[in-house]
Image: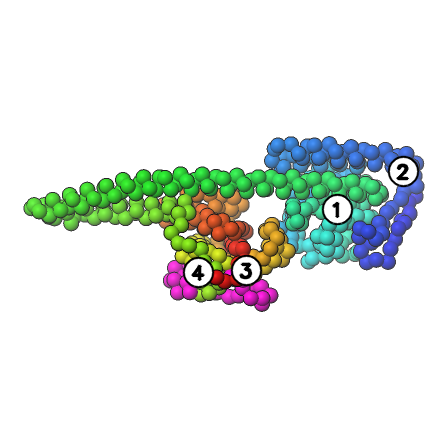
Amino acid sequence: MRRTIGVSADPHPNRVGTHYAATVDLSPTHSPEAKLARRDAVLAAVTRASERLSEPQPWATLVDEALRILGEATRVSRVYVFEVDHREGVECVSQRFEWCAPGVTAQIDNPGLQGVPLEAAGYVRWSELLRAGEPVFGDIEDFPESERPLLELQEIRSILVQPIFEGSRWWGFMGFDACDAVQSWERAEVDTLRIAALLLGAAIHRQTRESQMREVQKLEALGRMASSVAHDFNNVLMVIAGATELLKGELEATDARHLAEGPHAVMIDQALERASTLTRRLLEFSRRRTGRPQVVCPLELLRREEPLLRQAVGPRVQLRIFQGGDGRPIAPVRIEPTEFAQVVLNLAVNARDAMPTGGELIFDVSTVDASDSPASFDLMTEGRWTLLRVADCGDGMSPEVLAHAFEPFYTTKGRDRGTGLGLSTVQGIVTAAGGHIRVSSTVGRGTEFRVYLPAAIEPA
């Protein structure tokens, strides 16, 4: 026999600090002694899981074991982790990890649990509570009718869902499903399992920051190397170019003038030009700055470069430039104008190459706070940022390509179509200006780059 207590007229009965809806089973297996034993087991499991997640290994390789520890202690049917992502501005969730008790049907390969739009699927309440850092839990029969179908398909009778935060960003959630019988959740258990979700978020956040730091260090080392190589190579080119001119002069002074202007001489000149272009690109990548940063308006700079951008993308691509956001004025930024032009031109050429049959390319400039979307999703630090969004509707990038997008010399373009330094140069310029660049892409649906530059207080 069981009964429901703690029922509140609050439309969000699971809200922390108000009422905790709890289901109490009066059978002998739910005696005070049994509940105390389970509570102790859950606390011990969270401690063991935290030790596992703190190991110096990629967090994704540690999650399965942590879920097993928590699942066995709570005696539920399934424990899992969902990640939140944004697809065309829609908040979706996808299952990434799962542990199942013996005899329980796994859901990790269920396509219905990948890319689920929370609001459209009837889980607006979940989104509001989890984003606010509050759990969702209780008996499925007590849940709103809009939330039941997907849960009942998985034969869930009771559930506990805890939010996972990476820093200040809502990263996803950790869930506990009871399928064999209704599971009551004591407040102490809810709070203890909340710690497990917080620890997982901390592990993700720590390793994300470490990875970003390694990337910065790698780029700095490559920049120094590229600068050294470029200068040495440029010196060699100067010797070759000088010797070639002397040789041409000697040939012209003899009866071999035709050799000085022949196809072999032309090939040498073309090779020297290509080598010189590569040297300039290497120097750009090494962030050897020739100008001084200025306080400028990005939207004005963008409109100034519009004729060049239209020429670069060609007639098949429709270029749109506009001021986005909520209508607030665009905050100025501090950057060298020619370097800003280089950033937008590189991004425009990349978009053009991703749309060989044409399409639409959008440049959208706005000013956002760190708490605004998408800045909060992109983990921007506190303060005001001027955001440049560059979105196309092209081929998109696979997750494997996306992971290497900013790596120097990495390119998916054909031979003689790219050096692989375009996006690396963009990242170097943006980073040197104190900004950040983020990218999201879906194969067949396009790519969006988001360039964040710190807002300058006043124009100089």
Tell me the distance, in whole angstroms, between the alpha carbons under discs 2 and 1: 22 Å
* Disc 2 target residue: 30
Instruction: Kindly identify the residue that appears in the image at 40 percent across and 57 percent down.
Output: 338
Of the residues tagged 3 and 1, which is closer to the observer? 3
Is residue 342 found left or right of 362 in the rendered image?
A: left
Answer left or right for 272 relative to 69. left
Q: Which amino acid type is marked by label 1?
A: Val
Mark 3 residue type: Ile
Q: Earlier in the sequence, mark 1 or mark 4?
A: 1
The alpha-carbon separation of the residues under discs 3 and 4 comes to: 39 Å
Q: Are marks 3 and 2 in contact (CB under 8 Å)?
A: no
Helix, strand or loop at disc 2? helix
Residue 444 in the image: state x and y as whole percent: 51, 53
Q: Depth-wise, is mark 3 or mark 2 nearer the camera?
A: 3
Q: Label 2 sits on what residue type?
A: His
In the rendered structure, the answer to whether residue 435 lies left or right of residue 422 reads right
Q: CA distance from mark 3 to mark 2?
A: 62 Å
In this rendered view, identify the residue nearer to me: 231 or 399. Answer: 231
Residue under label 1: 161
Q: Which residue in the protein does label 3 denote?
A: 457
Q: Are marks 2 and 1 in contact (CB under 8 Å)?
A: no
